Amino acid sequence: QTGTGKTAAFGLPVLHHIDPKVKKVQALVLCPTRELCLQISRDMRSYAEFIPGIKIAAIYGGASIEIQIRQLGEGPQIIVATPGRLNDMIRRKKVDLSHVEWAVLDEADEMLDMGFQEDVDTILETTPKEKHTLLFSATMPDEVERILAKYMTNPVIKTVGKRNTGTANVKHIYYMVQARDRYAALKRIADFNPRIYAIIFCRTRIETQEIADSLIRDGYSADSLHGDLSQAARDNVMSRFRNRTIQMLVATDVAARGLDVNDLTHVINYNLPDDSEVYLHRSGRTGRADKTGTCVSIINLKEKYKIKQIEKKIGREFGKAKVPTGVQVCEKQLFQHVDRMENVDIDEEIESFLPVIYRKLEWMNREEIIKRFVSLEFNRFLEYYRDARDLNVDETQRSRDKEPSEDRGKRRDKHGESRDRNERGDKGDRRIRDDRDADFTRMFLSVGRKDKVLPPQIIGIINEVTRSREIRIGRIDILDNYSFVDVDSNSVGKILKAFANEHANPRGIRIEKASERNEDNSGSHKKTRFVPSKFSKRGKPSGDKQYSDDVWKKPERKNPAFRKKKGK
């Protein structure tokens, strides 16, 4: 069971049996990730602080192998390592494990899930047959049972809590929403829990980055953790999250393995995993060390069966929660703001400024001052949630609501609409898309793939320059040097005026209505397309042919070369 102090459970006995005078590797700890390797080695060093002569080496990928080779040459008694890098050291003949008396496999199931089966076998085969072996695993799949049978003699299995079940300190709840409303629901959950300290799990690296970018744009202290990050970037993100500089960390399962952070209030499943054991790993990151936590899942009607499967697996029932209404969120934020004001520490150095402050505020009475100070922080929530719709879905509903959402253009709902294409069907609702040209205007934007922009960045540029989150944005085509963006026709004048203002647009990004010349010249460039939900009346799906369906009713181009190409 996670959060029960495993490192101390094996670390203290191992240190007790180490002979500091012998400069041989006497204990080996294998773990799945670099983060866990560093964490265990730090903990072990703190336990051994008053034992002179003990050396502990952390061996992991992503760091200088030359430095680690020098560490091994200094005669450490304990090695904490990831399987891949340690196996590399064995092949290079830089480490001798023939004197190992203690072997510890921490998070064995995750090591095997990550494909380290052969590396683990190779490493254990280089250690003496007679040794103490300790294996820790949150779950006991067949692969772990095989390790027990092959490398352990008459193993004694100790189970903390029920086998393959989660901790009792974790509350499991789910929110039922439309697939397009996932991000809007995530925002409301976060806004309703002002002190949230959470990991948000997504399926893919791209989705992870997009969700993190959206949260950052919406004013949250958030960041992403996924496989595309460099090791330095990962270290930076991890350090800021542990220090609570980051409030919400958006991560993939693989990237978050070995991540051990105390006092998480929430684990949020932006998408439910297909494997119940993965859910166990996720939920086990909160409710640790006898503290309580909440594991939240945002699902749609088609995913309800997964909840039943997980309930059966963990032997616990999920509670169904209602996505907070706009009024509830505003009320919670207001009281949180008042509590912060009530409990703030007053710095005595402010005394010298008070006479001036009193003079500036003396024309207001007590009630007016309170209203204004509260409004400074609270107005943005009140403005956004003033006409917020209900995101909850009736579980008895059998078909999707076919009507577009009335506030889909708002910043917190926009992202969610582009998710889960399978939920809306690959071909979409063509009747709705037919009149795209009546609602949207094609715009030329002078940034492209070479500027390293993705759809979220383009949306962010438009929002930033116009100082508005209300503009509806449709299809986005990103080319090498520039991009095309469909925007709400009613907002074209506002956009052109904002981009013409050098104070609002200091980078000098150019935007104009797309001409036929612009679009014809774009045909020879490779495009990256972003196709929003069918509910937004925004363009056709990507494909090999341009405008090949009469369904899209694209106006015939007047360029003779184009007509010739189309055989007209």
Image: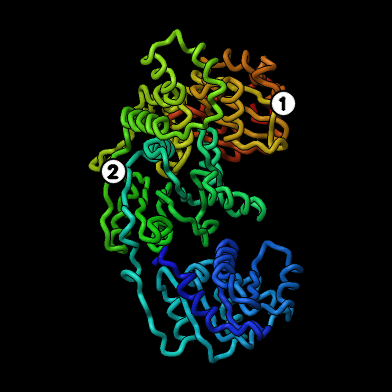
Residue at 32% of width from left, 35% of height from top? 324
Give the residue pinned by disc 2.
321
* Mark pair 1, 2: CA separation: 59 Å
Residue nearest the observer in this picture, 138 or 417: 138
Amino acid type, callout 2: Ala
In the rendered image, residue 443, in percent from the top left (x then y), is placed at: 62, 22
Residue at 48% of width from left, 35% of height from top? 415
Q: In which quarter of the image is residue 508?
A: top right
In the rendered image, residue 444, in percent from the top left (x then y), is placed at: 65, 23
In the rendered image, residue 340, in percent from the top left (x then y), is placed at: 41, 33
> Above or below — where is 432 with respect to 257?
above
Residue at 65% of width from left, 78% of height from top? 53
Q: Which of marks 1 and 2 is in front?
A: 2
Q: Residue 561 carries which label?
A: 1
Q: Earlier in the sequence, mark 1 or mark 2?
A: 2
> Above or below — where is 66 with respect to 514?
below
Q: Is residue 402 left or right of residue 218?
A: left
Residue nearest the observer in this picture, 527 or 131: 131
Whether residue 244 appears in this view of the structure is: yes
Give the secondary structure at mark 1: helix
Amino acid type, callout 1: Ala
> Above or below — where is 54 with respect to 446?
below
Q: Quadrant of residue 282?
A: bottom left
Residue nearest the observer in this picture, 51 or 64: 51
Question: Which quarter of the rendered picture does the C terminus lie within?
Answer: top right
Return the residue found at the far top. 363
